[in-house]
Amino acid sequence: MINLVSSAVVSFFIYAFFGWVWETAYCSYIEKRFERRGFLFGPICPIYGAGAMGAVLLLGWIGDPFLLFVAGATLATIIELITARALLISFGKRWWDYSHMPLNYKGYICAPATVLFGGFSVACVQIIQPAFMQVFAAVAPHTLSLVAASMLAVCSVDVLCSIERELGLALYLNGAKNRIMYELQNYMYSR
């Protein structure tokens, strides 16, 4: 029996990783040099995981590919707009700017990205997530749960360190970060 929560968590991180790969490759090609993307230190862009799992969980009931495309494009664009504004308000900077793209709104969202997200939503709901679920069904439930918990733990540390970097909360988080690093080093060298 598949653990649906663990499946959703692992799926989120897979989508977030491939979103990071896509963005890094695309932006590196445009800039003609390596362009590391994302807010976090690690190789994930959580907005892709949120968009993909939002489509899977909220729109998975839509059977018509065209309606799914429209609903997925709308949902992903709303997520992108809210995320862009939240990052700007929280950290005073932008992680993307679509000002040079056609039909953009304040550089936060644009029509070409919306169309891409619509297609991505259809692919996630109708092709990719069903394939993931087949793979997850072949994995022992406790193993899938352990993988999901490990991914959440590593990402939590990454989020804390990334926020520390962006907001300069070094004094507040320094003790916890040092303790985690100390424990990780002890674990690695004790093996």
Image: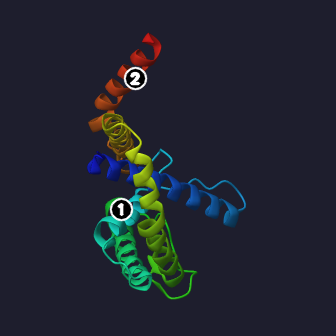
Instruction: State which quarter of the image contains the C terminus.
Output: top left
Viewed as shown, does residue 63 lie left or right of 29? left
- Tag 2 and tag 1, C-beta contact below 8 Å: no
Q: Callout 1: 10 Å neighbours few (<14), some, many (20+)?
A: many
Q: How many marks?
A: 2
Q: Work out whether residue 176 or residue 123 is closer to the camera in this orientation and state it.
A: 123
Q: Give the amino acid type for the residue marked by disc 1 in the picture.
A: Met
Give the mark, 2 or 1, whose residue is nearer the N terminus: 1
Name the secondary structure under disc 1: helix
Disc marking residue 157: none
Q: Quadrant of residue 150?
A: top left
Residue 175 image point, x, y percent: 29, 28
Name the secondary structure under disc 2: helix
The residue that appears at 47% across and 45% down in the rendered structure is 41
Instruction: State which quarter of the image contains the N terminus.
Output: top left
Residue 39, can we see it? no
Q: Give the amino acid type for the residue marked by disc 2 in the picture.
A: Leu
Residue 135 image point, x, y percent: 45, 48
Name the residue furthest top.
190
According to the picture, the residue beneath numbered tag 1 turns out to be: 53
The residue that appears at 36% across and 46% down in the rendered structure is 159
Disc marking residue 184: 2
